[in-house]
Image (cartoon, rainbow, N blue to C red):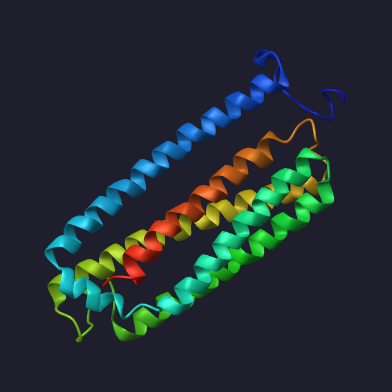
Amino acid sequence: MSTETSPWEEHFGSRENQSRAAQLGMWIFLGSEVLLFTNLFVGYAVYRYYYPEVFAKASKHLAADWATVQTLLLVTSSLFVALAVHYIRHGRQFLTALVLLVAMGMGVGFLGIKGWEYWKHWTEGALPGEFYRLEDLPVQGGSLFFTLYFLLTGLHAIHMLVALGLLGWLVFGAVAGKYTAEYHIPVEVGGLYWHLVDVFWLFIYPLLYLVE
């Protein structure tokens, strides 16, 4: 296929080299994201060590059943993103766009549930920092738990929004015929980002919702 339909930068020498460079760049970026969330997880572990009982009681105020639904949505969405990579490697642009749209729908469903959960916390006063007014739990440990809760889930939600925008851009490119069996680097690296956001949730889910 010609370079007009399968673009690549000449200074890479070949499409294969460009693909490896793009994947390496994405892995480096994902590594920095892992470091960011790792610091938050360590902070959570420290405060949970000091307030184990309060954290366990605070976790009961979270909607664990709906969080399980969110987890199923994200795990399934990762399957559809993986299918998108499979389809585009075989040059099937329409199916690539279709499964990416399904993954996006699941991501929107995830955020919808999270928005409802935030509203529930707002009404009962389970809020971070000085806004905390939940009477069922002591202010010191309870405020810390919900501060970490909103920090972790809020940062994850921001990453979800970015990932949804990225998938939308990939859908547009697939429909426009920008990606082919020979050129599909954006779909592969975009899929990596989506998978990482899902993996972050697989750590957040038990840390916040399954505290014993």
- What's the residue at 59%, 66% (across, down)? 108
For this orientation, the residue located farthest to the front is: 212
Q: In the rendering, at what x and y percent does residue 168 appear? A: 67, 53
Horizontal side of 25 relative to 125 (left or right) equals right
Which image quarter is the C terminus in?
bottom left
Q: Image height check: is 68 above or below 178?
A: below
Q: Image height check: is 117 above or below 2?
A: below
Q: In the rendering, at what x and y percent does residue 24 appear? A: 53, 28
Q: In the rendering, at what x and y percent does residue 137 appear? A: 18, 81
- What's the residue at 58%, 24% (across, down)? 21
Which image quarter is the N terminus in?
top right
* Total residue callouts: 0
Horizontal side of 34 relative to 93 (left or right) equals left
Q: In the rendering, at what x and y percent does residue 5 appear? A: 84, 30
Q: In this view of the protein, can residue 95 be seen by the observer?
A: yes
Horizontal side of 55 relative to 8 (left or right) equals left
- What's the residue at 23%, 54% (across, down)? 43
Q: In this view of the protein, can residue 142 be seen by the observer?
A: no
Given residues 10 and 47, the one toward you in this image is: 47
Quarter assignment of residue 19: top right
- What's the residue at 71%, 17% (across, down)? 14
Given residues 20 and 11, the one toward you in this image is: 20
